[in-house]
Image (spheres, coloured by chain):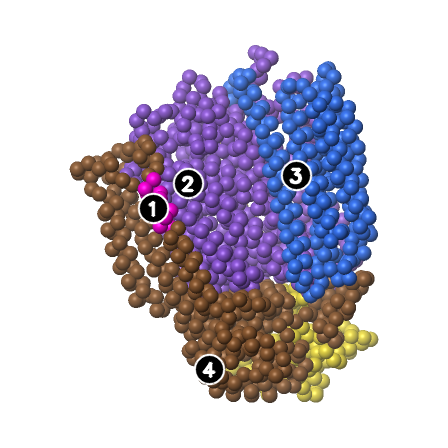
């Protein structure tokens, strides 16, 4: 927006707007960075929480100048060129008011750079953060060191975990209507409604569902992964603070969706070791009855599937044949 | 029509609309607790244990969904009531008795075959104590009584699916085939605690969790725990 | 005051205005016909997406157990009849443009018969399907395809039939021997409509071949 | 007085063919008691419903899954399908399609005079536009009341006004009804009424399809409302399978409701696109098209191309629930991901179906109240088209945490952030238009400016959501809920209000009351922001969507939001009062061109005659030559009057 029509008395509006904008942006950004930024939820309990907080704050640092830029511009226009203001000049139409190549090029250039930077930065954070705590599907492309070995070993009966050896802890999250339960394959595959995690450890959450879609949201851990039936959705994070956290279901899953939450805790590695071995032996009687540890659990076609599909009554479809050994004996 | 006439018309139409909305809310959305609340805190000395007796039935036999499975509760006067919100005193021992009239099936997740959160993590089936039940054997599990937020879960073992005298309409009497499951638990502090069943018993619904499993007053409700 | 008809005095349209509106109308039939094909393409693409998605996922190894196939004879019959209808419609339209109204009528009505035959075969096929709808991903998408194809055939045959019926009525109401080929508004609109209709049938023939291959041959 | 080449035009303008056969037969003439209207439609709907229910139970009642579950989805589905067919038969939508089968041409319609035409299958686009106002307000107020119920439940974290089932039912119904409303809220009333007027056309391309789109929209209301007596559906408006497959009979209402509304959307988009392409007046080149028409054209393209996917997804869902296919059931060879992909492939263009007309209204209104030409017209049009195109390539950003194609997340993060470029163009246009202007803060202008404020927040938070790491926190929580309320309610609904206050004088010849309008604006603007801004914080603090219980420490914020929401609801009462007062109780006649606009739609007679323009206008230039000396007039209206040339900021005449 050039100022071709600027007369002697006309102030240089764009410069004024620019100055107000820069001052407001600097103050806003500084205030945000030092006062708000460090407290942005969900805190810094894990590696993904810490890096996602940084990501949020960087976005906010860029968003504030954008917001201020547009607000200042609009506000300035409202004050300066409101029709009721005494002596406001008649506007000038014509070609100059219809488009301004410089302004358009600048606008497109700046917003493109901003957008491309954000996409690039987000991608780097995503990859560097091993998926940033989000669900990465059954075969994660970005994962912490040792995760592949731990995941592969988890399916064997020899899987184990000992503190201090930097082993990735594999936790299976089983969502069902309407509760999460957790299996620990490295501790004999016991299952528990309690989620306890060791400090300073990379955790591989393997999230699956026994029925409809749920979403495992460990809020303070900054982990969120949808639980789909017959799908394994893996999310990683590394704990770095002791404390309690909340787990909620964040995908509408039916009647008791709102009641589908529990609290977990991050404890010291030795306390975790202690809890896990104790629970493993306490639950041993039930663990042997559980379905063998697997990434997903196919329902019994007749009983647990609810009898919606008339399996087995229509030839040639036979659930026994199609499900084969995966079908639990009933 | 004069202006006053038009004004009256609009106001009348508005009143009619409001009435329709109120009626719609009352009929379709039904604020409040479905069925109502059975109160176990009245006529109860403070601190003394509460006896809570319920039954499960395979097909309730009356109401809007006669084929649905449901819980019934015995109110303090000893009458069976179709109602799943129970008002209980806080920090009090609850002695719960379940008359199980329904047959069983394998659990979707054998985790719920474990008795959890009761006093001593144990329950009794027809007088015999148990802590774990393998649902792939025997009669399977009919239902579980579970309060997820209290980590309370008790598998209610099913009756023989081929029993000659199954109960098909509530309330059932003890001359029908049944199991008696007893356990005790402590109520926590005041609050609303939802309870539900983890057996896919909503027959004819995908994963067995639709219909009665997804409708309050059938296979789920609240423990309304109040401070005394 | 808001009653618009009260403000409508008797006016007359100039010939230019009539011609302008008529061109708009012909253009609408033309572009509407293509837009309709676009809409239908997205509908069929959704089905094709479901097909290939479930095929690639092969969840529970239940994409297509035992390589079950819908009755191939029905598939070929339905598709051949659809193709025949399309070819007859296209042939008829070409003959019509060259002035042979009788050829258009004969080809068109045979086309309608073929379309109805395809519809009947598509419906009757349900009785001959050797699998349960929910038994596999293939079975599900096949049922979906059958339902969508019933819709397609109904729409196409209806369009062909209404064109022919219009043509017949034009002949009955007109004194000239070939009113379809006249230069009046009615005839021009009629020809635009027939043209769009043949394009649709051509689209049905091509997309039908793809789905024939997907469901019966692959 | 009719000469052979000319025709009298005191007929329905859609009836361009009638002159071809002046000696038409009397096949359409019926006695008055056989005429078709809303009443016969309702009767037809009820009869169809009863018949369909009987048929479904007759065929499938004995199937074991129907007997066991105590519900027969096939019967419910057939009842609703036949109900809609009966409704359409009753209103007369099938008269012409059936007559066509015996070669009839469109019947000679004598336009109905008086108020009864609003209850009929009327072919005048101006009547359809007004019908749509009532239609979308019906949706809007129903959805709004449900929103009040949601906020009532959320007043307390643990004490429940409604049960959890009823709460989910309310949430789902609110979301679905509002989404359906939002697809049509501007396109329906303003698009149908003003697109022909803005492009200098006397008619719509397919008036029957237009009337069909309205009447099936109303049938859609009945279908989706039927979910409430059926006990609702538990899935929210996104209808995720397999919960969808598990749900009760209300789910059928959802699936068929969206299918029915989808048919209406396709019909509306089809008709509008054909009209804009083919019925522009001479001289109305693409570069002279009013920007609102560009927005509507982009929207129409999305409506026609994206909606078939929704239709297909809904069809598969209905098949899963009735004939037990397994499209969405993973254990049976289907996939729960399939619905998510199909739904969001429609769902994201759907979001822009809602946003674009709002942009169009705002950009159309700005020049009038700034007395300046629209800044960067080409950029604005390119932005609309760009948004429409890009919207097909971003759908997986709804699925960042779902585990679907996780390695594609950087790509979808990029496409999603790229879409903020064309969206940003709208802001450039707004800012350039305001610069050195003379701004009149009339009620429509205030609403239009509020769109910029709200949509800025909605758009910036959209960038937060598109960033995969940040998305981990905000996905599925109140943050995203607040984000899309800022874009849809803050953007679209404010733009709808701007459009309504701006164009109602043309549609009805009556002015909206300015004082009440200002009250309406300020209460709506303030309480909208007070309602939804706290939800960003609530979301960041960890409250998931659609829950009936939440953490106790969030009660203060939730209560603040709830109370603001009730006051926001109150502002809609002010709107309703204003509408009734100004349109019915004590109407003030509007000047012919109350805002002193150059737009072609203001140049026709008032009220708009049936045929819109006495002569088809010849367009000389675009309608944005404000404050320009020696500017050409917009159009030659051909009746001895040229449309006025505006030179400056005359004060509003109201």
**Chain D pictured colour:** purple
Question: Are the residues flagged by discs 4 and 3 from a single subunit?
Answer: no
Q: Nearer the viewer, residue D551 or B15?
A: D551
Which chain identifier belongs to the yellow chain?
A: B
* Residue at point 75%, 33% (across, down): C88
Write down the chain letter for disc 1.
Answer: A
- Magenta residues? A101-111
* Residue at point 34%, 37% (across, down): A99
The image position of residue A297, as x and y in percent, is 66, 71
Disc nearest the viewer among 3 and 2: 2
- Residue D335 in view (yes/no): yes
- Residue A106 badge: 1
* Residue at point 78%, 41% (across, down): C80
Q: Is residue D99 above or below residue D432?
A: above
Q: Quadrant of the C terminus of chain D?
A: top left
Question: What is the CA distance from the residue labelled 1 to the residue labelled 2?
Answer: 16 Å
Which chain identifier belongs to the brown chain?
A: A
Circle nearer the N terminus (3, 2)? 3
Disc nearest the viewer among 2 and 4: 2
Which chain identifier belongs to the blue chain?
A: C
Q: Secondary structure at mark 1?
A: helix
Question: Are the residues flagged by discs 2 and 4 from a single subunit?
Answer: no
Q: Residue furthest left?
A: A8
- Residue A267 badge: 4
């Amino acid at each position: 927006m050039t100022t071709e029509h600027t007369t002697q008395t006309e102030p240089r509006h764009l410069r004024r707007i620019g100055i107000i904008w820069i001052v407001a942006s600097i103050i806003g950004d500084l205030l945000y960075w030092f006062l708000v930024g460090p407290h942005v939820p969900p805190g810094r309990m894990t590696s993904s929480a810490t890096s996602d907080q940084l990501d949020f704050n960087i976005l906010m640092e860029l968003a504030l100048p954008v917001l201020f830029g547009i607000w200042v511009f609009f506000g300035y226009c409202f004050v300066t060129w409101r029709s009721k203001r005494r002596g406001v000049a008649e506007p000038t139409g014509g070609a100059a008011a219809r488009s301004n190549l410089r302004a358009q090029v600048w606008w497109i250039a700046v917003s493109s750079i901003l957008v491309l930077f954000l996409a690039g930065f987000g991608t780097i954070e995503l990859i560097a953060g091993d998926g940033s705590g989000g669900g990465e599907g059954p075969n994660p492309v970005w994962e912490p060191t040792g995760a592949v070995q731990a995941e592969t070993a988890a399916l064997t009966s020899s899987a184990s975990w000992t503190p201090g050896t930097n082993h990735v802890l594999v936790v299976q999250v089983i969502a069902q209507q309407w509760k999460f339960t957790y299996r620990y394959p490295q501790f004999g595959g016991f299952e528990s409604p309690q989620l306890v995690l060791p400090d300073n450890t990379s955790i591989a959450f393997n999230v699956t569902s026994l029925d409809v879609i749920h979403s495992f949201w460990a809020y303070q851990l900054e982990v969120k992964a949808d639980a789909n039936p017959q799908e394994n959705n893996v999310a990683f994070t590394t704990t770095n603070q002791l404390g309690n956290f909340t787990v909620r279901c964040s995908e509408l899953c039916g009647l008791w969706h709102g009641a589908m939450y529990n609290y977990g805790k991050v404890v010291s590695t030795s306390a975790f070791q202690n809890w896990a071995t104790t629970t493993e032996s306490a639950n041993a009687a039930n663990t042997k009855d559980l379905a063998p540890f697997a990434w997903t659990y196919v329902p019994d076609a007749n009983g647990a599937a609810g009898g919606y599909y008339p399996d087995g009554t229509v030839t040639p479809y036979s659930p026994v044949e199609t499900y084969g050994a995966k079908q639990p004996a009933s | 029509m004069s202006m006053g006439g038009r004004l009256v018309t609009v106001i009348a139409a508005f009143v009619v609309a409001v009435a329709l909305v109120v009626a719609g809310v009352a009929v379709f959305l039904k604020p409040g607790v479905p069925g109502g609340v059975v109160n176990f805190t009245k006529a109860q000395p403070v601190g003394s244990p509460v006896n809570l007796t319920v039954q499960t039935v395979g097909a309730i036999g009356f109401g809007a969904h006669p084929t649905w499975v449901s819980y019934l509760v015995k109110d303090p006067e000893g009458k069976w009531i179709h109602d799943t919100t129970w008002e209980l005193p806080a920090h009090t021992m609850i002695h719960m008795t379940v008359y199980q009239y329904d047959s069983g099936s394998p659990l979707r997740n054998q985790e719920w075959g474990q008795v959890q959160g009761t006093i001593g993590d144990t329950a009794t089936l027809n007088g015999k104590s148990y802590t774990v039940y393998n649902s792939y054997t025997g009669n399977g599990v009919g239902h579980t009584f579970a309060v997820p937020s209290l980590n309370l879960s008790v598998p209610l073992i099913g009756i023989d699916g081929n029993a000659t005298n199954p109960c098909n309409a509530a309330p059932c009497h003890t001359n029908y085939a049944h199991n008696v499951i007893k356990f005790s638990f402590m109520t926590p502090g005041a609050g609303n605690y939802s309870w539900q069943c983890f057996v896919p018993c909503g027959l004819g619904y995908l994963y067995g969790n639709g219909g009665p499993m997804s409708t309050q007053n059938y296979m789920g409700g609240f423990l309304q725990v109040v401070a005394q | 005051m808001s009653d618009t008809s009260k403000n409508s005095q008797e006016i007359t349209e100039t010939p230019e205005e009539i011609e302008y509106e008529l061109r708009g109308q012909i253009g609408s039939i033309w572009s509407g016909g293509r837009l309709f094909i676009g809409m239908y393409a997205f509908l069929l693409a959704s089905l094709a997406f479901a097909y290939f998605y479930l095929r690639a996922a092969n969840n529970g190894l239940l994409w297509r157990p035992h390589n079950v196939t819908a009755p191939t004879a029905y598939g070929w019959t339905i598709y051949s009849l659809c193709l025949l209808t399309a070819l007859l419609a296209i042939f008829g339209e070409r003959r019509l443009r060259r002035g042979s109204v009788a050829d258009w009528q004969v080809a068109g009505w045979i086309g309608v018969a073929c379309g109805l035959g395809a519809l009947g075969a598509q419906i009757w096929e349900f009785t001959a399907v050797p699998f349960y709808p929910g038994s596999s991903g293939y079975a599900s998408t096949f049922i979906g395809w059958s339902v969508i194809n019933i819709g397609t055939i109904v729409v196409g045959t209806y369009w062909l039939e209404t064109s022919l019926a219009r043509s017949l009525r034009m002949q009955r109401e007109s004194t000239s021997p070939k009113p379809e080929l006249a230069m009046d508004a009615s005839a021009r609109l009629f020809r635009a409509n027939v043209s769009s209709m043949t394009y649709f049938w051509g689209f049905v023939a091509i997309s039908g071949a793809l789905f024939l291959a997907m469901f019966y041959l692959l | 007085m009719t000469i052979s080449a000319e025709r009298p035009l005191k007929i329905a303008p859609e009836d361009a063919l009638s002159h071809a056969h002046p000696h038409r037969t009397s096949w359409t003439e019926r006695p008055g008691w056989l005429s078709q209207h809303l009443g016969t439609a309702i009767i037809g709907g009820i009869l169809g419903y009863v018949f369909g229910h009987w048929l479904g139970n007759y065929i499938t009642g004995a199937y074991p899954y129907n007997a066991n579950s105590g519900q027969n989805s096939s019967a419910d589905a057939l009842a609703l399908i036949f109900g809609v067919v009966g409704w359409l038969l009753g209103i007369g939508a099938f008269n012409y399609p059936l007559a066509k089968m015996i070669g009839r041409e469109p019947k000679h319609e004598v336009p109905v005079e008086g108020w009864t035409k609003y209850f009929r299958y009327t072919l005048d686009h101006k009547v359809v536009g007004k019908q749509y106002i009532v239609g979308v307000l019906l949706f809007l107020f129903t959805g709004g009341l449900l929103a009040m119920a949601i906020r009532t439940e959320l007043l307390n974290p643990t004490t429940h006004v409604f049960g959890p089932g009823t709460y989910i039912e309310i949430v789902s119904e609110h979301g679905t009804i509002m989404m359906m409303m939002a697809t049509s809220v501007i396109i329906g009333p303003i698009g149908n009424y003003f697109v022909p007027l803005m492009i200098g056309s006397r008619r719509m391309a397919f008036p029957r399809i237009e009337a069909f789109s309205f009447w099936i929209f109303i049938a859609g209301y009945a279908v989706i409302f039927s979910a409430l007596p059926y006990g609702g559906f538990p899935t929210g408006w996104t209808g995720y399978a397999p919960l969808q497959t598990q749900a009760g009979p209300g789910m059928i209402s959802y699936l068929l409701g969206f299918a029915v509304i989808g048919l209406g959307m396709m019909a509306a988009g089809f008709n509008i696109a054909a009209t804009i392409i083919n019925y522009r007046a001479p001289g109305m080149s693409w570069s002279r098209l009013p920007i609102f028409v560009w927005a509507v054209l982009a929207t129409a393209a999305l409506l026609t191309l994206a909606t078939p996917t929704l239709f297909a997804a809904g069809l598969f869902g209905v098949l899963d629930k009735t004939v037990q296919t397994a499209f969405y059931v993973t254990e049976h060879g289907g996939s729960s991901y399939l619905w998510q992909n199909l739904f969001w492939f429609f769902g994201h263009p759907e979001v822009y179906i809602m946003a674009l007309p709002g942009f169009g209204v705002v950009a159309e209104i700005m020049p009038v109240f700034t007395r300046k030409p629209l800044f960067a017209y080409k950029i604005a049009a390119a932005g609309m088209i760009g948004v429409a195109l890009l919207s097909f390539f971003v759908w997986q950003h709804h699925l960042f945490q779902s585990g679907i194609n996780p390695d594609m997340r950087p790509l979808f993060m990029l496409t999603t952030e790229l879409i903020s470029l064309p969206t940003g163009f709208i802001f450039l246009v707004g800012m350039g238009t305001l610069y050195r202007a003379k701004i009149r803060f009339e009620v429509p202008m205030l609403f239009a400016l509020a769109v910029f404020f709200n949509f800025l927040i909605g758009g910036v938070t959209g960038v937060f959501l598109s960033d995969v790491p940040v998305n981990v926190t905000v996905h599925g929580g109140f943050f995203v809920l607040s984000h899309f309320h800022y874009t849809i309610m803050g953007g679209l609904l404010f733009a709808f209000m701007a459009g309504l206050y701006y164009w109602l004088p043309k549609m009805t010849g009556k002015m909206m009351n300015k004082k009440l309008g200002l009250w309406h604006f300020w209460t709506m603007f303030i309480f909208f922001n007070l309602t939804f801004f706290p939800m960003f914080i609530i979301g960041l603090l960890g409250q998931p969507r659609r829950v009936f219980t939440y953490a106790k420490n969030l009660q203060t914020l939730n209560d603040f939001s709830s109370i603001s929401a009730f006051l926001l609801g109150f502002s809609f009462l002010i709107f309703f009062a204003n509408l009734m007062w100004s349109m019915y109780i004590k109407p003030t006649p509007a000047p012919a061109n109350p805002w002193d606009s150059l737009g072609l739609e203001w140049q026709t007679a008032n009220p708009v005659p049936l045929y819109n323009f006495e002569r088809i206008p010849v367009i000389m230039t675009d309608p944005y030559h404000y404050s320009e000396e020696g500017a050409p007039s917009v159009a030659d209206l051909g009746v001895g009057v040229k449309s006025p040339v505006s030179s400056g900021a005359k004060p509003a005449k109201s």
